[in-house]
Amino acid sequence: MTHYAKGYQGEELVARSIGRLGLKVIYVGGAVKYTIDGPTFFCSDLLVYGYGRSFFVQVKHKEVRRKYGDTGLEEYQYNNLLKHQSNTGLSTLLLFTDKSGQIYGHWVVELHRLISCQHPDPRAWNKEDECWMIYFHRNLLQDYRVLLESHIPQPSQTNLKLEELFWDVKS
């Protein structure tokens, strides 16, 4: 399976799983997108919305490194996620999945605390792909449902009547 096909498989799994929680998911494809005036910004894989909130999701479909018990992404992608979140003002969630089918990760704003090799350099060189990587210990990453609890209201919070959501234009 190609890296692209494997990535798409992970994105599809994550999108379906988030959708089952009652959120809507738009596939935005992970590529660099262009704004109307020309500058570019990095775009995540998924745009998720619902319950009055929206956020981006970047999906990585890769196995945990057995020797170290961690998983990660390329340093430039990590930096792009930080920049993307800053530019858009929307929260960004980094989620990993693997052949176990589990989905886990963390909000990008919290990732700096979870980097697995802190000293002397938080990066590690990946000889196979010839790039710097940022890794996170798997046991510090949380299940996606736990991460999304704050974005999904409890049933008691959703008991609004439809007419309460609109102004009465007759009065």
Image: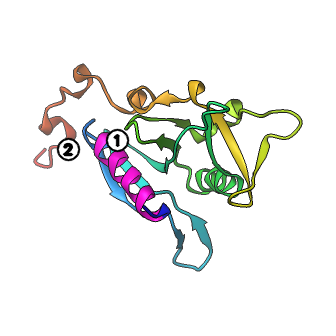
Q: Quadrant of residue 139?
A: top right
Q: Is residue 110 visible?
A: no
Q: Quadrant of residue 7?
A: bottom left
Q: Is residue 114 above or below residue 130?
A: above
Q: Residues within 10 Å of mark 2 (few under 14, many from 20)?
A: few
Q: Is residue 164 above or below residue 28?
A: above
Amino acid at the residue labelled 2:
Trp
Residue sitting at x 13%, y 38%: 162
Percent position (x, y) of residue 108?
59, 41
Q: Residue furthest right?
A: 120
Q: Residue furthest left?
A: 170
Residue sitting at x 60%, y 56%: 84
Amino acid at the residue labelled 1:
Gly
Q: Nearer the viewer, mark 2 or mark 1?
A: 1
Q: Residues within 10 Å of mark 1 (few under 14, many from 20)?
A: few
Residue sitting at x 27%, y 43%: 19
Task: Name the residue beneath numbered marker 2.
Answer: 167
Percent position (x, y) of residue 138?
57, 30
Tag 1 secondary structure: loop
Magenta-tinted stretch: 4-17
Say whether residue 8 is magenta: yes
Task: Name the residue beneath numbered marker 1.
Answer: 52
Q: Is residue 145 toward the left or the right of residue 171 in the image?
A: right
Tag 2 secondary structure: loop
